[in-house]
Amino acid sequence: MPDRHTSAAKTSPNAAESGPIPGAESAPDVVSVLLPLPLPGAYDYLVPAGRPLHPGDVVRVPLGRREVAGVVWDRPADGPPAEVPANRLKSVLSRYEVPPFPAVQRRFLDWVATYTMASPGAVLRMALSVPAALEPPRPVAAYRLRAGAPPAKLTAARRRVLAELADGPARPLAELARAAGVSPSVIKGLCDLGLVESVALPPRPVVAAPDHGRAGPSLSADQAAAAAALVETLAGGFAVTVLDGVTGSGKTEVYFEAIAAALARGRQVLVLLPEIALSAQWLARFAERFGAAPAVWHSELTTTQRRATWRAVAYGEARVVVGARSALFLPFAELGLIVIDEEHDAAFKQEDGVAYHARDMAVVRAQLGAFPIILVSATPSLESAVNADAGRYGRLHLPDRHGGARMPEVTLVDLRRHKPQRVEGVGQGWLSPPLRQAVAETLAAGEQTMLFLNRRGYAPLTLCRTCGHRLQCPQCTAWLVEHRLAGRLQCHHCGHQAAIPEACPACRTEGALAACGPGVERLAEEVAALFPEARTTVMASDTVSGPSAAAALLTAIVAREIDIVIGTQIVAKGHHFPYLTLVGVVDADLGLFGGDLRAAERTHQLLHQVAGRAGRAEHAGRVLLQTVEPTHPVMQALASGDRDRFMDLEIETRIRAGLPPFGHLAALILSDPDAGRVDGVCRALARAVPGADGIDVFGPAPAPLAILRGRHRRRFLLKARRGLRPQPFLRQWLAAVRIPSQTRLQIDIDPYSFL
Ligand code: ADP
Ligand code: ZN
């Protein structure tokens, strides 16, 4: 049982200053309340007389001088008595009129906290992320015409507002202002004149209900079999199914059938996508299939949208939520199916704050809720593949592309033999002669090309040709990346920006700074010089700002308004471009090296996914991979299409090294502005490592990203034999060392980043 109830009560700052609480004499009711703050545990509060509270109730309580919202948490029945006497406890102030957190949600949050070793309050904060959602929404002020003829002398702007309202219903301020192309003050002015009046409208629902009864497309035999198997899992309890199908095989159509079946059973559905901001095509397909948009949840929502969506999920009004990883913590009332699309994607791992993997935690959520979960990918993660091989997960195969589209032909271009030439007016080129020729052929055929380079900006490094000085971030162990379009140097780790200097900051030579290596902007320059007639666009997270810009660009590509798309990994994800027939991977080796245990697996997944953009419709596709390592197993697997052989090799390597999933890893990252202090803490930790059979601790070592935002970083890596859990060991270890408040300790169970 968790021990935090006792320790929390001991350290509770909520003990009343003095004097008994009226009415507290006769065995008062006490509840534990978990607060969304990084505290060690729940705190005890008195229940106001005559207003019983139950676990899950969302309540307002005093904390020191503040008032905060928290959730009544479960008290272990056999737990020790609280150490703060009841007459010194403060009282719960009020209960919010929102549905209580279901028991399964509370158990889930506890589970995540125990597993990730984060404080339960920090995990609760992910679920109570919109405090404003606890208050009932205020009615929306809307504006409508007031009877009476307008006076003759009105400005054009005012006349536009009146025209917009002419015979329509009352409309909210912002919407009306947008439609009339005026500022809100114009509408307010019309109110003052008595021409327009405001009325209160009830808040609009976030989304209409999806219609699960609508017919989907007629499925192929393979698709129908997979869909039927998924639908069948809905009749049972917890089950994990890996939906493993080549790109373009119709995985989305297949799991839509499972969504329809879950909706028909009256359950809510959660779909997690790695890049929800780029998922306009997915949203459009969903709306077409179900006649209504799903509720969406991601970091770019406005507070108003977040608040409305949170409530809609809690009240069960939102039946399908599609979101980024944080959507997993929404307070679903009736969740009955989770789908993780592109389940292998590293975007599901959160590194900051509570370090968790949304796919893994989603499996736990499904298990606690006793419902099925579907993991979807053309390149399942090694973890999921091993679970499927062992029979712990089910696996469904879609071996063929839909509608007879063939898989693209993949060719390796050995860069040592086919060296990129210099380009007139640009300098060093990055496209090899075979790739250049393929682009020219594709253009001539009126088809589209995608050039993939997973590097934002113009050049990853700028150095002085005179003295060799390299431009580095003043706060991080990282080079500054030139972004020529924005005219800035940028640190991709901390966001630091600087102007591009005229002279070398070290030797003061003017005009000696040179860009080294390519980014997508530089590639665009080469393409413009080689193919001046082509319509080209660059797609990277910093050149495409926000979901609507991304959607517009994707629409332009589908409409064939673009010939060559130059992009980073954001172009790799899920998009369907029927006229895209050539994919050129400019540097296939990028990301292959660097000591990350998943480097090969991830490179394979990413390049497979990029390659999968080619030839998805009736036009056959081809893929050219530029590499200096054509014999590397990843390149061989991509060229031959023999994914399973590659996976078997990877599995063997991991087994031999005892690496996940054949063993557990955990990382400790210590950081401090003071290098001496963090080294001192690391020495103390190193001395305190408990002896344990089957668990090894490596480090401390300076992190590869040794300085980040001015903090010196050190890492320990813990490796535990399969079947041994690192958490109890870590608890014992960390209890033995006092860590000063200035030193930050981050615990990362199952780390994916080793920087
Ligand atoms: P995946 O998710 O496996 O990459 P998609 O579900 O995106 O595949 O399907 C690829 C394309 O084929 C999409 O445009 C999709 O609408 C279409 N498609 C797949 N299955 C069918 C089907 N049974 N009927 C009609 N169109 C389909
Ligand atoms: Zn930096």
Image: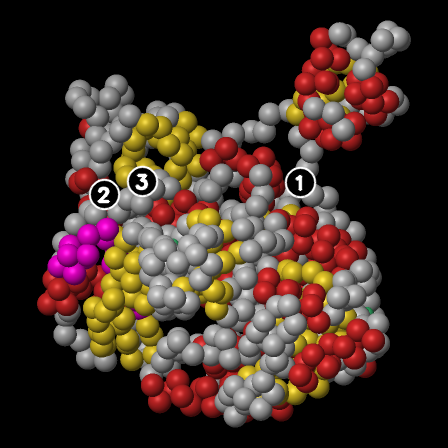
First in sequence, mark 2 or 3: give its number. 2
Q: Nearer the viewer, residue 324 or 512?
A: 512
Crowd around label 1: few <14 · some 14–19 · many ≥20 (10 Å):
many
Identify the residue at image location x=66%, y=30%. 203
Q: Disc 3 residue type?
A: Ser
Query: Which residue position is annotated with label 1?
Result: 206
Crowd around label 2: few <14 · some 14–19 · many ≥20 (10 Å):
many
Residue 677 part of the magenta-drawn span: yes
Query: Which residue position is annotated with label 2?
Result: 8
Taking 39 as reference, is 368 above or below it? below
Query: Which residue position is annotated with label 3?
Result: 32
Q: Nearer the viewer, residue 114 or 150?
A: 150
- On the image, the x and y values in percent for residue 337 come to 59, 60
Q: What stretch is highlighted in magenta?
A: 666-681
Identify the residue at image location x=21%, y=30%. 15
Q: Disc 2 residue type?
A: Ala
